[in-house]
């Protein structure tokens, strides 16, 4: 039955894991892949308490060729999360959804990233100054940039991944 429906047998029997087989692939030809949208909300502001057990809210289909050619990445480590807060306005607004590439976590190019800092998920623009010194920037000018020496941090700090695409509400 799982083969006929093109679903993961573990999901069919136990209700766990991805619904689709083959890394979220839809259909037999691999044209589309499903990317998980998690129920976590990354604050573009002070941050929201994040649990390590975020649940998949739904799966959203993306063209595999578009991911490879336009975003220049693989769908294997992609995830979607909601944006809340105002510190990344006007670039990102509450209700927007961002696609996060977890392959691009530490030491990548400057840009927008999802962070877990002291238990809070945040979306910020990162600028690498030197070595382990990082400038954390909000697009909204009412929030001041913060310089952080990662080797001196005492609280939990993790770069989850780079924001590579956003879906906006109008």
Image (cartoon, rainbow, N blue to C red):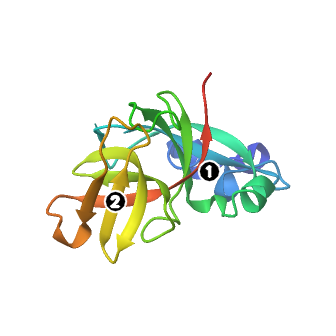
* Residue 23 screen position, x and y as percent: 65, 57
Is 158 placed above or below 60 here?
below
Q: Which residue is mark 1?
A: 9
Q: Residue furthest right?
A: 29
Quarter of the rendering occupied by the N terminus: top right
Residue 22 quadrant: bottom right
Q: Residues within 10 Å of mark 2 (few under 14, many from 20)?
A: some
Q: Residues within 10 Å of mark 1 (few under 14, many from 20)?
A: some
Badge number at residue 81: none
Q: Which residue is mark 2?
A: 135
Q: Residue at position x 62%, y 21% from top?
A: 170
* Residue 142 screen position, x and y as percent: 33, 34
* Residue 131 screen position, x and y as percent: 33, 78
Q: Residue furthest front?
A: 141
Q: Position of 72 compared to 150: left or right? A: right
Residue 97 quadrant: top right
**Closer to the camera in the image, 15 or 117:** 117
Q: Residue at position x 42%, y 62% from top?
A: 127
Q: Residue furthest bottom?
A: 131
SS state under label 1: helix
Is 167 placed above or below 99 here?
above
* Residue 151 screen position, x and y as percent: 21, 73
Q: Looking at the image, is mark 1 or mark 2 nearer the viewer?
A: 2
Q: Position of 92 compared to 68: left or right? A: left
**Lower sequence index among marks 1 and 2:** 1
Q: Residue at position x 61%, y 61% from top?
A: 76
> Between marks 1 and 2, how big is the CA–CA gap?
45 Å
SS state under label 2: strand
Q: Position of 21 compared to 41: left or right? A: right
**Closer to the camera in the image, 37 or 166:** 166
Q: Residue furthest left?
A: 154
């Amino acid at each position: 039955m799982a083969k006929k429906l093109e679903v993961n047998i573990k999901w069919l029997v136990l209700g766990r894991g991805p619904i689709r087989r083959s890394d979220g692939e839809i259909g037999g030809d691999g044209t589309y892949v499903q990317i998980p949208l998690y129920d976590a909300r990354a604050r573009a502001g002070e941050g929201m308490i994040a649990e390590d057990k975020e649940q998949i809210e739904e799966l959203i289909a993306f063209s595999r060729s578009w991911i490879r050619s336009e975003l220049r990445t693989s769908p294997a480590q992609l995830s979607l999360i909601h944006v809340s807060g105002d510190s990344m306005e006007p670039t990102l607004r509450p209700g927007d959804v961002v696609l996060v590439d977890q392959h691009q976590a530490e030491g990548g190019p400057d840009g927008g990233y999802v962070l877990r800092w002291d238990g809070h998920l945040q979306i910020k623009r990162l600028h690498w100054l030197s070595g382990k010194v990082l400038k954390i920037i909000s697009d909204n000018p009412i929030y001041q940039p913060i310089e952080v020496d990662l080797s001196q941090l005492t609280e939990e700090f993790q770069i989850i991944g780079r924001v590579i695409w956003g879906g906006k509400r109008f």
